[in-house]
Amino acid sequence: MRIGQLAELTDTTPRRLRFYEEQGLIRVDRAANGYRDYDERLVEQVSHIRGLLEAGLSTRLIKQILPCLDDPRDIHFADATPDIIATLEGHRDKLAQRIELLTRNHAAVADYVGALKQCALGVER
Amino acid sequence: MRIGQLAELTDTTPRRLRFYEEQGLIRVDRAANGYRDYDERLVEQVSHIRGLLEAGLSTRLIKQILPCLDDPRDIHFADATPDIIATLEGHRDKLAQRIELLTRNHAAVADYVGALKQCALGVER
DNA sequence: TGAAACCTTCACATCCGTGTCAAGGTCAAG
DNA sequence: CTTGACCTTGACACGGATGTGAAGGTTTCA
């Protein structure tokens, strides 16, 4: 599939797809004429990457945790070095922290909105 | 308190504090000589803002949800207009989505790390 | 064959959160 | 009074993710 089609399928732009490739987030083949040729599976992968970016993760971080996210549960045994494990554990823990913080703040916003709606109801009556 | 002291207390820099003020995230008094004069309560507020920024939220979003986060539960009744409520509900729901996504990915990373460690153990034996 | 729609690379522009530096004001200690 | 540590504003610079546009090649279709 060509870049325009993938862009449409993933609700993004050719510019972004080229950027993700340049950052090493996706691997892309080339057709004989030089056009990029995208595998079907990239639809899901790119959607995934978009989600992570919108959630505030950097391409640098995403690149490092991508192997964890590939669907076929084929662990790359070569990656079982202590330092790679330590790096991933760091990312894992930072994700946990981030989730905690967002959860607390989500609760605060939800509470506040609830109170505001109560207040609005009171006025309406 | 002056800018340097607050920066130290919040483990940040004067540059950032000025920027947060410029973006309307904090309100800052001035001493007679023109120096910024920070209230004690800003220590907590700035730490909070730092957390949200590190969690990937924009200053624009943070500014909008800040009223939800002020400690004294004094709702600003003037804010109970339908559009403000709708905006906050939008932010609330986006936060929920973000948390969901991060939670899924955290689990994936955790699983992967677990498998890697199993693998490393196998080699060691 | 020629026009339209797609692709290529390259480059410059934008926004955001920061760093950094210059030029100058304030203040406390020596 | 001077020195040094702090503050002020203003500007320029940078990296990251993206938009946009130029100059040109390819495909498709009439």
Image (cartoon, coloured by chain):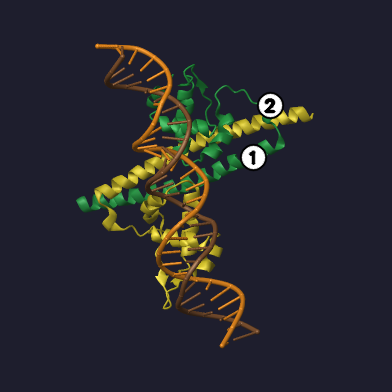
Chain colours: A yellow, B green, C orange, D brown
Would you say residue A95 is visible in this rendering? yes
Crowding at dot 2, Cα within 10 Å, few <14 / some 14-19 / many 20+, comes out as few
Chain letter, disc 2 residue:
B
Q: Residue at x 43, y 77 (%)?
A: A33
Chain letter, disc 1 residue:
B
Q: Nearer the viewer, residue D20 or B117?
A: D20
Crowding at dot 1, Cα within 10 Å, few <14 / some 14-19 / many 20+, comes out as some
Q: Nearer the viewer, residue D21 or A65?
A: D21
Rendering coords of residue A125 (x, y %)? 79, 28
Q: Residue at x 65, y 26 (%)?
A: B76
What secondary structure is found at the residue carrying circle 2? helix
- The extreme right residue here reads A125
Above or below — where is B115 with respect to A108?
Answer: below
The image shows a total of numbered marks equal to 2
What secondary structure is found at the residue carrying circle 1? helix
Q: Residue at x 54, y 36 (%)?
A: B62
Rendering coords of residue B26 (x, y %)? 52, 28
- Residue highlighted by disc 2: B77
Above or below — where is D2 with respect to B70?
Answer: above
2 or 1: tag closer to the N-terminus? 2
- Residue highlighted by disc 1: B87
Three-letter amino acid code of the residue under disc 1 = Thr
Q: Which mark, by number, is residue B62?
A: none
Q: Nearer the viewer, residue C8 or A27?
A: C8
Above or below — where is C25 with respect to B124?
Answer: above
- The extreme left residue here reads B125
Q: Is residue A50 left or right of residue B80?
A: left
Cα gap from disc 2 to disc 1, whole angstroms: 16 Å
Rendering coords of residue D21 (x, y %)? 53, 63
Q: Nearer the viewer, residue D25 or B84?
A: D25
